[in-house]
Image: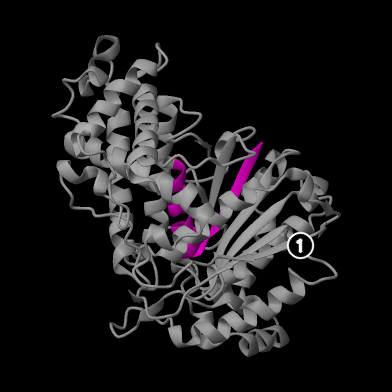
Amino acid sequence: MALYIFGIGGTGARVLKAFTFLMASGMSVENTEAVIPILIDPDTANGDLTRTIEILKAYQTVQRTAGSTSGFFGTAVKSLNEQGDGGGAEDQFRFDLEGVTGKRFKEFIDYEGMNRANRALASLLYSEKNLASDMQVGFKGNPHIGSAVLNKMRESALFQKFAAALNENDRVFIISSIFGGTGAAGFPILVKNIRSADAGIPNHARLREVPMGAVTVLPYFDVDGSSGKTVIDSNSFIAKTKDALAYYAQNLTSEAAPRLNALYYIGDNLGNTQAGADGAQQQRNKAHFIELAAAMAIFDFMRIDRGALRVDDGIVQSPRYLEYGLKDTTSPVRFGHFGARSRAATAKALTQYYLFLRFFRDFYATQDEGPWAKDEDGKLLRKNLNARFVESLSSLNGYYEQWIEEMEQTGIGFRPFKRTVGDADILKIVEGFEEKPGFLALKGLKKYVDTLNSIVRQENRGQNPQAKLLSLFQKTTTALVDERIRL
């Protein structure tokens, strides 16, 4: 059983980044044995895309070195290369759009090779600026350009490989924005290519009936165009969203022929301003709470029982349409604003991982004289941990901290942690949830270390050091959150 996640465009990459951090934090992706991310973006140097790929690679190294199957890093992540006969997915997780690199849009559609009537039609549909667009930096908020390019996706070797690798109990999930160019165009085309697969596509019958969910992200930021570095106009986002929703209603969610088993909608008021950039490394938007909430939709979709995900020849039976809401819209958002299910799953997992991250970064070197580190002949002494594991874990943790910090600063603002607390207050780290010790009980870091020393005696013997580390800290932080923080 595998979950294929298509992240389309910059928003797709950012939501997939949040999803990876939630998996690292121990959230379980139910009904699957592996997650296979596939990032689709013609802008191969896009800063959001390259950062997400780096995070996925670090996650892979940590998970595989430890061999984790539950808790922190408990879900395997594979590339499409690893499915079937290998080959096809360039850069491990990136879908290489063929015929885009180094071309203007007019070259892609062979404008000069058209007859007079077809050139006139193309000129009617596309402005001179559209025709001169450099596709190597994406579609710059133009879904009509994206549609023409992405419509050829089904002919690509990689789509054929995806189709051939699909098994009976697999699922598909698609992440996209509705107000840009790549995501708004790519989402309905990808759904069409899957649900309308013909006999020329491997496993075409299975594709037509694979359980499929999606999250479509409505406008949640605007773009500062004052620098002159972008042609994207965020004043058009709402109009584009209305047009796209009307199209989706007719082609994806109609009562007569619904195409998705579950479609999640999410957005925010505009006002979260991002620096304008038309692509490449300059497009590196700050993280936003909306992307975290969108990532939660994937876990929700995977909890649905397989029997409730019926599809008959491309037509979904009993589709679901969902939105995400908070108990309170006060800014900044904290865990207390989450509903009961989000708090029990997401808030607890994020808190546990952040407690682990802080200990690993700030206290590991000074606290490794205790029984927890010296158990099994010092297995958890830092010198005994795999060097690649430590490097990848530290890299991912750095991105994780950056992610938390950026979410504090953008849009609605998400501030779950007191990130500057010291050792005495480490268990007071969650905003709005104070540590609740007894009068004479150990507190802060002393309680943390005491719990490590107690739980290490319950650990299975014979694990490799990396597996033991992740297991011990997952169980320890579970006990600390349940006993002291009580989310």
Q: Looking at the image, which residue sits at the far front?
A: 439
Give the labeled residue for mark 1: 259
Q: Is 111 located above or below residue 168 in the figure?
A: below
Residue at point 63%, 78% (across, down): 244
> Mainly helix, strand or loop, the magenta region?
helix
Q: In the depicted view, which residue is nearer to us: 230 or 290?
A: 290
- Mark 1, secondary structure of its residue: loop
Query: The magenta stretch spans which residues?
Result: 1-23
In the rendered view, would you say 486 is above or below 268? above
Q: 232 or 286: which is nearer to us?
A: 286
Residue 210 left/right relative to 360: right
Please give left or right for residue 419 compared with residue 90 in the image.
left
Q: Residues within 10 Å of mark 1 (few under 14, many from 20)?
A: many
* Residue 424 horizontal/vertical position (percent): 16, 42
The answer to which image quadrant residue 390 occupies is top left
Q: What residue type is labelled 1?
A: Arg
The magenta stretch spans residue 2: yes
* Viewport quadrant of the N terminus: top right
Q: Is residue 371 left or right of residue 271?
A: left
Viewer-closest of 427 and 56: 427
**Quadrant housing residue 448:** top left
Front residue of this view, candidates 205 and 132: 205
Image height of 326 relative to 382, above or below:
below
Q: In which quarter of the image is residue 356?
A: top left
420 up-or-down from 36: above or below: below
Q: Is residue 65 left or right of residue 110?
A: left
